[in-house]
Image (cartoon, helix red, strand yellow):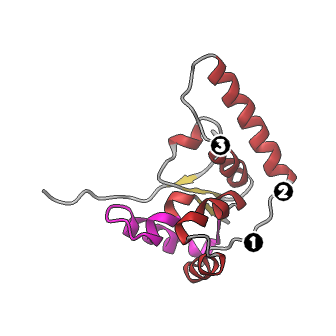
Amino acid sequence: MWVVDTCIVLDIFENDPAFGRPSAKLLHKLLPHGLTISPVTMVELSAAFSGDLAEQKYFLDQAGISYHEPWTAADTEQAHAAWNAYVGAKRQAQTVKRPIADILIGGFAANRTGLVTRNPRDFTRWFPRLKIQEPSVISPAP
């Protein structure tokens, strides 16, 4: 099952002019393999839906994205190791600030097929074996 990052869901929900269509096409291609979001993404999406959980669930259901995948102890262990690596790098001024949400999403995705995101660099350093799918965005002609 592919884990869909928050940015991809927002691209589609907001019909982003640059990323909406490519993100939707990639999810359509991956749909037969199963799509889910992490509990962290479920929370992050709240503001986009003005806190309307029923509307948010309806949108995800229509998109074929599950939001029922449970967080496991293995997810915590993946995120735990990645956060430790991040803090060590941060203390040595070897990295920029990284939101804990990305570490948690990466930990969740590491125990599934992989992650669908357009921000692969936010994850690859902390999860080097994580499979990542990124939408192809073609720049509009000048």
Instruction: Please say whether residue 19 is one of the residues in the magenta stretch.
Output: yes
Region rendered in magenta: 9-37
Residue ID at (69%, 71%): 67
Residue matched to label 1: 68
Mark 3 to mark 2 CA distance (whole Å) = 19 Å
Residue matched to label 2: 72
Q: Amino acid at mark 1?
A: His
**Front: mark 1 or 3:** 1
Quarter where residue 112 is shown = bottom right
Q: Amino acid at mark 2?
A: Thr
- Tell me residue 47's x, y (percent): 56, 64
Mark 1 to mark 2 CA distance (whole Å) = 12 Å
Q: Main secondary structure of the magenta part?
A: helix
Residue ID at (56%, 79%): 59
Q: Which mark is residue 15?
A: none
Q: Amino acid at mark 3?
A: Arg
- Of the residues under marks 3 and 2, which one precedes in the sequence? 2
